Amino acid sequence: MIIVMKRGASAQEIESVCQRLQKEGFSIHMSEGVEKTIIGAVGDKSRVVISNLEGLDGVEKIVPVLQPYKLAGRDFRQEDTVIRIGDVEIGGGQIQVFSGPCAVESWEQLLEAALAVKKAGARILRGGAFKPRSSPYAFQGLEEQGLKLLARAREETGLLIVTEVMDPRSIDLIAEYSDILQVGARNMQNFHLLRELSKINKPILLKRGLSATIEEWLMAAEYIMSGGNYDVILCERGIRTFETATRNTLDLSAIPVIKSLSHLPIIVDPSHGCGKWQLVRPMSMAALAAGADGLMIEVHPNPAEALCDGPQSLKPHKFVSLMDELRGVAGLMGRTI
Amino acid sequence: MIIVMKRGASAQEIESVCQRLQKEGFSIHMSEGVEKTIIGAVGDKSRVVISNLEGLDGVEKIVPVLQPYKLAGRDFRQEDTVIRIGDVEIGGGQIQVFSGPCAVESWEQLLEAALAVKKAGARILRGGAFKPRSSPYAFQGLEEQGLKLLARAREETGLLIVTEVMDPRSIDLIAEYSDILQVGARNMQNFHLLRELSKINKPILLKRGLSATIEEWLMAAEYIMSGGNYDVILCERGIRTFETATRNTLDLSAIPVIKSLSHLPIIVDPSHGCGKWQLVRPMSMAALAAGADGLMIEVHPNPAEALCDGPQSLKPHKFVSLMDELRGVAGLMGRTI
Amino acid sequence: MIIVMKRGASAQEIESVCQRLQKEGFSIHMSEGVEKTIIGAVGDKSRVVISNLEGLDGVEKIVPVLQPYKLAGRDFRQEDTVIRIGDVEIGGGQIQVFSGPCAVESWEQLLEAALAVKKAGARILRGGAFKPRSSPYAFQGLEEQGLKLLARAREETGLLIVTEVMDPRSIDLIAEYSDILQVGARNMQNFHLLRELSKINKPILLKRGLSATIEEWLMAAEYIMSGGNYDVILCERGIRTFETATRNTLDLSAIPVIKSLSHLPIIVDPSHGCGKWQLVRPMSMAALAAGADGLMIEVHPNPAEALCDGPQSLKPHKFVSLMDELRGVAGLMGRTI
Amino acid sequence: MIIVMKRGASAQEIESVCQRLQKEGFSIHMSEGVEKTIIGAVGDKSRVVISNLEGLDGVEKIVPVLQPYKLAGRDFRQEDTVIRIGDVEIGGGQIQVFSGPCAVESWEQLLEAALAVKKAGARILRGGAFKPRSSPYAFQGLEEQGLKLLARAREETGLLIVTEVMDPRSIDLIAEYSDILQVGARNMQNFHLLRELSKINKPILLKRGLSATIEEWLMAAEYIMSGGNYDVILCERGIRTFETATRNTLDLSAIPVIKSLSHLPIIVDPSHGCGKWQLVRPMSMAALAAGADGLMIEVHPNPAEALCDGPQSLKPHKFVSLMDELRGVAGLMGRTI
């Protein structure tokens, strides 16, 4: 950690900062500049409490040197993490497409979507049973009944199931039915939920918060990993910016940034990222070309009748042709779908 | 609701949109422009499902006309909501200052802060027992032990207590000790938490999410109110922007905007909003001048030793003199502290 | 245009709005809802003055129906615009890569970069002679001397030249040496500059402003086109967001959005968009996969000695291998480089 | 400046960074941590070229220690800058309100506004003769004719005149008529314009760019000051964020931040900052309470007929009563209007 002292900080102020640092177990390296004094503090402490040093007289700013995450970082693990569920690999040579309706509405709707997903060659079925909705008056999901339909769809199609968990109290219930548990963007920093998920032995799909920095996102993954669950899949789903032409701004540069900082797999959700089905195709192509390990794409047999996010859902036939195009990009990247 | 059709939408496309609207129970008003046709749909439906109309052929965009919130809006209630706890009023003529340490660390620390708060003339003591921390390795709060200390501080000082709830499972425990329950920025859209809080009979302090629009914020209040708990206090605590000179950007224009849209009281937290104690004084003055009903200010007997948010905490003597200045602004606004 | 009246707007307020609209030459379509009255106004007026209607008593909001741009929109021209300079096509089947150093520093530096660009198969050489720098103490460019070096590099290599114009007073000078004139992000809304550029007969490369919406960007293109210069090339170069892991956030979804709204060609600048050379390769691949018509990539023979933007510049050999990879993506998109 | 080396950087990489630094004239202070090596480089160089060190092998990041601005900073000048024009002081004990119509439309309109401004007790008349408009089809201002009307209004009322300059070619013309020259938000980084303005001897009102950081804003002031014109007045006018309830988000925390970093006066423009006249009153009160040296407020005799920004303009009688309220806040701050 580096402490930059204010121009004109007194010798006494500098001294008391050093004493405080030594008290905290740091060794000190002074660097007196023409205008300002810099103190290098060597040791391994949580940056958080240390931030208090900013309150000390004469201190201008604190510059952390070490990343706050350990387990999620490349320093901890050099090679990419590959998560295996049966013969399905996430983070390896195989691109995985997580696909299905935003919300499970009925057996007919789910089955039709699942068969389309299967036919197109995807291996993982997505569908919401518990839905986070900005309005208390909007459809909130079929809850356990929805989970049962997802399990039934798995039996019929052999697809793996991913569904969202919003509440620590429903983790056991959802884990009973689902192969992968999804944490939505609004819950990325729901720390009690993350801590409970760190105790289960199923992979967690962790969506990036609407205004989460990449560092905060990796710290959320750290919560899950620090409890013993190392199977975390990151999902970029768009960040909130001033631009209103799209629902969110899909930050594809997050893919190579994550690949350099972390060993965890990362997928992209262009459906939520853009909010319009017309943008799903080009942004899916772009995500794979940028190095994503997979995609999450909403497919609905009848978007105009969907109870949730219809405008961003692909019709089954469009999804099938998109998968064909994606195979081309995957091949170019030396991967398969 | 208004449906704007694309330039060159076919008569058949327009017709099928109208049929769909009528099927949904809307009455139709057509407006054929030189270049585009506009369909006015009169009825009262959730805008959410209707958004699917955007998926219909020929539709360019949907423009909702009614606000999505009902109970939180001025239309529902013209006069300001005033929340009373004993002789303490929130939203009335009396400005309320919620003050105390970010986290409860020890009896000595809490008592010293509480006495300073009391001496300065504030009526409500804040202190975190369960702390949302971006790092799993940072101090997470004293939990129930912290709640007990808060209750003891109430006995000693007569101050009301406000503390944060992060988890639906701990609502009963916290409600047992606290007079007001706080929902933090990261949980503003933790809908299961909001729904549980709608069932208790204590006021809820609802902080604005880091990237929540004012409409989303009011919809979060609507979740709490729709379950029967009308005592919601809104708290502006800064939004996330590109500016890094401050921890967040305090959006004071949210005060008059909320006052025009809603009848709920609104307070401002300049400590989290700015992240630096030096900015707390000017932004507190500004918040009251903009019409805020109160403030939430962090006070710590020894910020440099604080386990959380030291840099943004005021020392007791600074808080006392700030309160004196605030009385001047309150008086100017025809209010008291 | 649609005028949404406030709930409870009086008959007189509604009447006076209608009178004002009719005075402005609009025909009226009323739609009285349960709670609110909506007025559809048919006519073709600038949305700008009309915005004043928001000031009239009883008006809640104005919703424009027509896009503010005409010449830049798809409605004006269905097929894609293809700009031709000699045998170089921009916006057609051929992907164009604009490449070279951020700033022209010396003949040796420019020649080495130009030869690498040529060898790699690109056709357009970029290089700054007039540099917009956030510090008055930073290198401001070689000015006319830099232009002369660019022209000399064109003679040596046959590459086309693109360079930035910052000042209406230097348009003639730059147009004398350059094949394409670039408007930087900071000048996207320098309207006097845009108006002067609308009078010349060379293509304009218009970069998106750091916080410009796509609509504002197209309106800037409209400025250039409205004066008679239809050869505008749009360039996405990243927008400013809260994320600090990258210099800016490259908004690749702008590519399909622009393609749906406008007929103008769009290229992407991943060098400025990300600010790190390590991200240039994956984001270049992604940009082409998303449908971009070209790329602008910074190449410098010795980035560590560059006078400007070294960290985001590729070394020549890295650029050569990137071009090979880009050919693969271009082929997949049915295009060539 | 501090160079943070990557974990596992080789001794050779560290050595070559040190050699490069020494070559650039820096003296070196090494700090070898458990995981990373930090190099403190003492010397005074432009941070810009140095940023290239980020391109060197083994370097993780560069942390600048010194502020990039000199003349605009508190380090250069401890006491506040007070700008005097006749008996009008800006930045001193007297709060200045710059007021008038967005655009000069006619003599009648301007005179009526000017008389209201005068009557209310303000001393500076604002009015646009050259208007930056996002649409080429919108009213662009009366240009020189508008300047003549402003000068005539000054003769009639004795008010000082401030008007916007957009183009280096019109500086002389505008300086001939105006007492203060305004640089609009879109031109904050129009560096050639800033450089020309550094050569004149009239005060410059420098508006903050829509997405300019406070540091970039002070660097823009540095451009003007570095050429010899030290009379710069900063104007906060709202930044662009995700929130759409207001035209921009007025960043009042910029006031105390600027006061701590710089000696320059700062005023606030709540009209553009919020975009709605209803918000002008509360945000004007708040701006003064936060320590602003003045305000810029749009006043129009008939907002509904305004050719520009009608919705955010106050009617004369509302402005008069606002000024009375502002006197109360000014008094509380120990200042006068």
Image (cartoon, coloured by chain):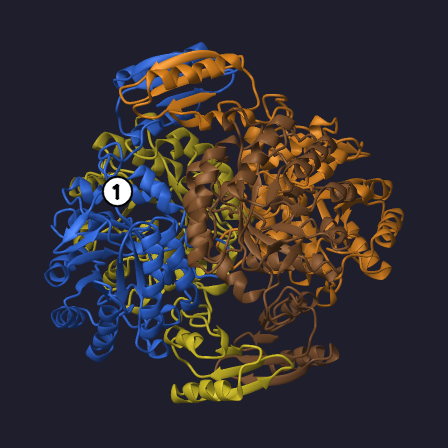
Chain colours: A orange, B brown, C yellow, D blue
Q: Say which of B241 and A91 sits in front.
A: B241
Q: Quadrant of residue D62?
A: top left
D127 lies above or below C7: above
Q: Say which of D17 and C120 sits in front.
A: D17
Question: Tag 1's secondary structure?
Answer: loop
Q: Quadrant of residue C214?
A: bottom left
Horizontal side of B272 relative to D103 (left or right) equals: right
Horizontal side of C235 relative to B273 (left or right) equals: left
Q: Residue at x 34, y 79 (%)?
A: D305
Q: Position of residue C15 (x, y in %)?
A: 48, 89
Pointer 1 chain: C
Determine crowd level at label 1: few under 14, some 14-19, many 20+ residues with C-alpha closer than 10 A. Answer: many
Horizontal side of A328 relative to C320 (left or right) equals: right
Q: Say which of D257 and B153 sits in front.
A: B153
Q: Position of residue C172 (x, y in %)?
A: 17, 55
A38 lies above or below C229: above
Asked if one can make out residue D224 in the rendered structure from this viewpoint, the answer is: yes
Asked if one can make out residue C238 in the rendered structure from this viewpoint, the answer is: no
A103 lies above or below C285: below
A279 lies above or below C310: below
- The residue singled out by tag 1 in the image is C131
Q: Say which of C315 and B146 sits in front.
A: B146
Question: Where is the N terminus of chain B found, in terms of image quarters?
Answer: bottom right
Q: Residue at x 35, y 31 (%)?
A: C310
Q: Amino acid at mark 1?
A: Lys
Q: Position of residue C254 (x, y in %)?
A: 49, 54
Q: Position of residue B189 (x, y in %)?
A: 66, 51
Horizontal side of A100 relative to C321 (left or right) equals: right
Number of disc labels: 1
Q: Quadrant of residue D174?
A: bottom left
Q: Residue at x 71, y 64 (%)?
A: A303
